[in-house]
Image (cartoon, grey):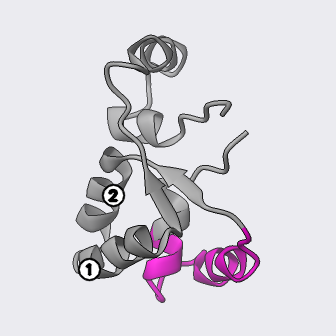
Protein backbone atom coordinates (compact mmCIF):
# COMPACT_ATOMS: atom_id res chain seq x y z
CA UNK A 1 0.00 0.00 0.00
CA UNK A 2 1.25 3.46 -0.87
CA UNK A 3 1.29 5.97 1.99
CA UNK A 4 -1.22 8.73 1.30
CA UNK A 5 -0.86 12.39 2.26
CA UNK A 6 -4.31 13.70 3.04
CA UNK A 7 -5.32 17.30 3.66
CA UNK A 8 -5.00 17.06 7.44
CA UNK A 9 -1.39 15.88 7.34
CA UNK A 10 -0.32 18.59 4.89
CA UNK A 11 -2.21 21.40 6.66
CA UNK A 12 -0.76 20.29 10.00
CA UNK A 13 2.75 20.26 8.55
CA UNK A 14 2.52 23.61 6.77
CA UNK A 15 0.58 25.60 9.40
CA UNK A 16 2.67 26.07 12.56
CA UNK A 17 -0.42 27.24 14.45
CA UNK A 18 -2.35 24.06 13.64
CA UNK A 19 -3.07 21.87 16.67
CA UNK A 20 -1.51 18.88 14.87
CA UNK A 21 1.62 20.65 13.62
CA UNK A 22 4.03 18.84 15.95
CA UNK A 23 2.55 15.46 15.02
CA UNK A 24 2.63 16.22 11.28
CA UNK A 25 6.19 17.57 11.45
CA UNK A 26 7.21 14.39 13.26
CA UNK A 27 5.66 12.31 10.46
CA UNK A 28 7.72 14.18 7.88
CA UNK A 29 10.87 13.84 10.01
CA UNK A 30 10.42 10.06 9.93
CA UNK A 31 9.43 9.96 6.27
CA UNK A 32 11.50 7.48 4.25
CA UNK A 33 9.28 7.16 1.21
CA UNK A 34 7.25 9.22 -1.24
CA UNK A 35 3.74 10.23 -0.17
CA UNK A 36 0.95 9.97 -2.71
CA UNK A 37 -1.70 12.66 -2.97
CA UNK A 38 -3.97 14.19 -5.59
CA UNK A 39 -4.71 17.59 -7.03
CA UNK A 40 -7.91 17.92 -4.96
CA UNK A 41 -5.86 17.64 -1.76
CA UNK A 42 -3.34 20.22 -3.00
CA UNK A 43 -6.20 22.62 -3.81
CA UNK A 44 -7.83 22.06 -0.42
CA UNK A 45 -4.54 22.62 1.43
CA UNK A 46 -4.02 25.88 -0.44
CA UNK A 47 -7.58 26.93 0.41
CA UNK A 48 -7.22 26.11 4.12
CA UNK A 49 -3.71 27.54 4.52
CA UNK A 50 -3.23 30.21 1.84
CA UNK A 51 0.32 30.64 0.67
CA UNK A 52 2.05 27.23 0.80
CA UNK A 53 1.69 26.60 -2.93
CA UNK A 54 5.39 27.19 -3.72
CA UNK A 55 6.44 24.87 -0.87
CA UNK A 56 4.00 22.19 -2.03
CA UNK A 57 5.41 22.39 -5.55
CA UNK A 58 8.93 22.15 -4.14
CA UNK A 59 7.86 18.98 -2.31
CA UNK A 60 6.59 17.61 -5.64
CA UNK A 61 9.79 18.64 -7.44
CA UNK A 62 11.97 16.95 -4.79
CA UNK A 63 9.88 13.79 -4.87
CA UNK A 64 8.44 14.05 -1.35
CA UNK A 65 4.91 14.23 -2.79
CA UNK A 66 3.71 12.31 -5.81
CA UNK A 67 0.52 13.70 -7.32
CA UNK A 68 -1.66 11.15 -9.06
CA UNK A 69 -4.79 11.79 -11.13
CA UNK A 70 -7.94 10.23 -9.76
CA UNK A 71 -10.30 10.28 -12.69
CA UNK A 72 -11.27 8.42 -14.81
CA UNK A 73 -9.17 5.48 -13.58
CA UNK A 74 -10.47 5.83 -10.01
CA UNK A 75 -14.06 6.77 -10.83
CA UNK A 76 -15.43 3.44 -9.59
CA UNK A 77 -13.52 3.59 -6.27
CA UNK A 78 -14.48 7.24 -5.72
CA UNK A 79 -18.10 6.42 -6.49
CA UNK A 80 -18.02 3.68 -3.84
CA UNK A 81 -16.61 6.16 -1.30
CA UNK A 82 -19.29 8.71 -2.14
CA UNK A 83 -21.94 6.07 -1.42
CA UNK A 84 -20.19 4.81 1.72
CA UNK A 85 -19.66 8.27 3.30
CA UNK A 86 -22.63 10.38 2.19
CA UNK A 87 -22.26 12.98 4.95
CA UNK A 88 -18.65 13.97 4.26
CA UNK A 89 -17.82 16.75 1.83
CA UNK A 90 -16.56 15.63 -1.55
CA UNK A 91 -13.03 16.94 -1.01
CA UNK A 92 -12.71 15.17 2.33
CA UNK A 93 -13.94 11.89 0.86
CA UNK A 94 -11.50 12.09 -2.03
CA UNK A 95 -8.65 13.13 0.28
CA UNK A 96 -9.18 9.97 2.32
CA UNK A 97 -8.97 7.72 -0.69
CA UNK A 98 -6.41 5.01 -0.09
CA UNK A 99 -5.57 2.61 -2.87
CA UNK A 100 -3.32 -0.40 -3.05
CA UNK A 101 -0.32 0.05 -5.30
The front one of 43 and 88 is 43
- Dot 2 falls on a residue whose secondary structure is helix
Residue that appears at 31% across and 45% down: 40
Residue 4: % across, % down: 59, 50
Q: Is residue 35 left or right of residue 54?
A: right
Residue 83: % across, % down: 47, 11
> Which residues lie in the magenta part?
11-32
Residue that appears at 67% across and 45% down: 2
Q: Quadrant of residue 14?
A: bottom left
Q: Is residue 96 left or right of residue 14?
A: right
Q: Quadrant of the C terminus?
A: top right
Earlier-in-chain disc, 1 versus 2: 2
Residue 17: % across, % down: 46, 87
For disc 2, the neighbor class at 10 Å (few under 14, some 14 to 19, many from 20) is many
Q: Quadrant of residue 43?
A: bottom left
Q: Is residue 18 left or right of residue 4?
A: left
Residue beneath disc 2: 42
Taking the magenta stretch, the answer to whether it contains residue 17 is yes
Looking at the image, the residue that sits furthest to the bottom is 16
Q: Is residue 32 above or below residue 51?
A: above
Disc on res. 54? 1
Taking the magenta stretch, the answer to whether it contains residue 54 is no
Q: Is residue 67 above or below residue 64?
A: above
Amino acid sequence: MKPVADTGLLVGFLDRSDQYHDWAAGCFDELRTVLTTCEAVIAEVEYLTPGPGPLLMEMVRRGTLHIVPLLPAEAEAIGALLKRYPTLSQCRRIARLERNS
